[in-house]
Amino acid sequence: MKQDKGDRAFVELLLMTRALGDVGLETLEVACDLTLQTGVIAAAIVMNEMRRLNEAARPKTMQSVMQAPILQIEPKADCSRYDSLRRMRYDH
């Protein structure tokens, strides 16, 4: 609260804690402990620690086993079409 806009940062931390649901308070507590260990007290550091802890808790998404479709006919570049569009004059 001694820092500029400290009350706003405190509210942002509480909102982030609320968004995390049941594990929010525990995450905030661990993030505060980690921040205190660094010796630099700032809400941005606490929020960063909370994001890191939250990312580690999320399960990794599975890679799709499907292959990308293979083109039967390769597309050809037709730059003349774009040149004809550039020649037209549009009034905006």
Image (tube, rainbow, N blue to C red):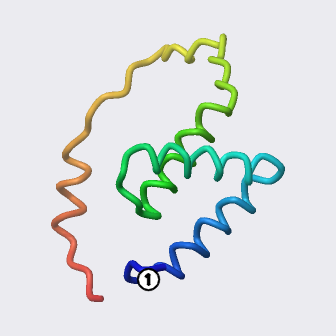
Residue at the image position 19 percent from the left and 47 percent from the top: 80
15 or 71, which is in the foreground?
15
Where's residue 89, x and y in %?
20, 78
Q: 49 left or right of 88?
A: right
78 or 30, which is in the foreground?
30
Mark count: 1
13 or 80, which is in the foreground?
13
Q: 68 left or right of 26?
A: left
Q: 2 left or right of 85?
A: right
Where's residue 65, x and y in %?
66, 11
Q: Residues within 10 Å of mark 1 (few under 14, many from 20)?
A: few
Where's residue 39, x and y in %?
36, 51
Q: 3 left or right of 66?
A: left
Relative to residue 5, is residue 24 depicted above or below?
A: above
Mark 1: which secondary structure? Answer: loop
Relative to residue 13, is residue 82 depicted above or below?
A: above
Occupied quadrant, residue 77:
top left
- The amino acid type of the residue labelled 1 equals Lys
Where's residue 74, x and y in %?
39, 20
Residue at the image position 49 percent from the left and 14 percent from the top: 72
Query: What is the residue that sits farthest to the bottom in this orientation?
Result: 92
Q: Which residue is mark 1?
A: 5
Residue at the image position 68 percent from the left and 33 percent from the top: 58
Residue at the image position 46 percent from the left and 49 percent from the top: 35
Quarter containing the C terminus: bottom left
